[in-house]
Image: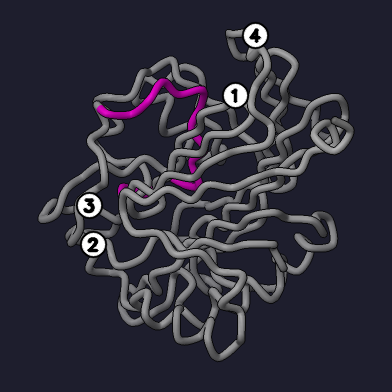
Amino acid sequence: MNTAKELVLPGDNTNPDLENGSVFFVGTATVILRYAGFTILTDPNFLHQGDHVHLGYGLRSQRVTDPAIAIEELPPLDLVVLSHMHEDHFDRVAEQKLDKSLPIVSTPHATKSLKKKGFNATQAIDTWESITVRKGEQSLKITSMPGRHGPGILAAALPPVMGSMLEFQSTGQTHFCLYITGDTLVYEQLKEIPKRYPNIDLALLHLGGTKVFGILLTMNGRQGVEAIQLISPQAAIPIHYNDYTVFKSPLEDFKAAVVLAELEDRVKYLKHGDTYNFQVRTQIAKEN
């Protein structure tokens, strides 16, 4: 049985706003999430249009978009949530310019690599394992979700990937539940997620239909809709699309699949630099 993991952040987080939060879309799988006094960065990728990433085995891919902001424009961060160690998710800009003492929650494979790069506050979690991040009276429970970055035997040749469930909590109550798919395909183990988490408020879907040698490695438009139907979040936002030459399923594929499935009222679309603002009806607000 896994030992409970805990990370205590500095600051008292007095009177945080529990009714309003936001997701700012930087590009690729990079977002800035603000809620309950926490500021969280996901999968930092700040390379620019024309830059290349190395995906292993001699494979390279060119970025065809720019991030909405430069890494120097980031707000003060509490932590990073990283789905896996691929250069389009943690690039050389992040390696050079992120604070080496910034907590990074990721897979054991990724945290081992990050330690070699000088990051000294990494937190490794295996599938279904959790870490509780405390800041004053507020807590954020991060649990590693199953993910498979490729079919069959090919998955073993790719970096292990995790999805993430973020539960913002205080006084024993979860106020907001956010699921980030990570670079996964829709596969059998994902069916366990809605059984354990039937009340997901928001899902961030890593799409793009990444293909290498014609083999699908991330969800395309059709699988993105399957994920919504399976996980059943109140709202879903597609990210990780149209950014690299290995992304072969454009956002338009997903939009068409959403229309066919009659899910338009559940999906929110962001362009780079857009912010999705959400409201949370907490028990505290209801009592007042």
* Furthest-left residue in this view: 50
The image quadrant of residue 146 is: bottom right
Residue 188 vs 16, above or below: the answer is below
Residue 33 vs 266, above or below: the answer is above
Q: Which one is in front in this view, the residue at disc 2 or the one at disc 4?
A: 4
What separation in Å lies between label 1 and label 4 (alpha carbons)? Answer: 9 Å
The image quadrant of residue 230 is: bottom right
Q: Which residue is mark 3?
A: 53
Q: Which one is in front in this view, the residue at disc 3 or the one at disc 1?
A: 1
Q: Earlier in the sequence, mark 3 or mark 4?
A: 4
Looking at the picture, how far across and down is residue 135, in whole percent?
66, 17
What separation in Å lies between label 2 and label 4 (alpha carbons)? Answer: 46 Å
Q: Earlier in the sequence, mark 3 or mark 2?
A: 3
Task: Tell me the magenta residue range.
Answer: 73-87
Q: Which residue is mark 4?
A: 12
Binning the other alpha carbons within 10 Å of mark 4 as few (below 14), some (14 to 19) or many (20 upward) gives few
Is disc 4 placed on a helix, strand or loop? loop
Q: Which residue is mark 2?
A: 59
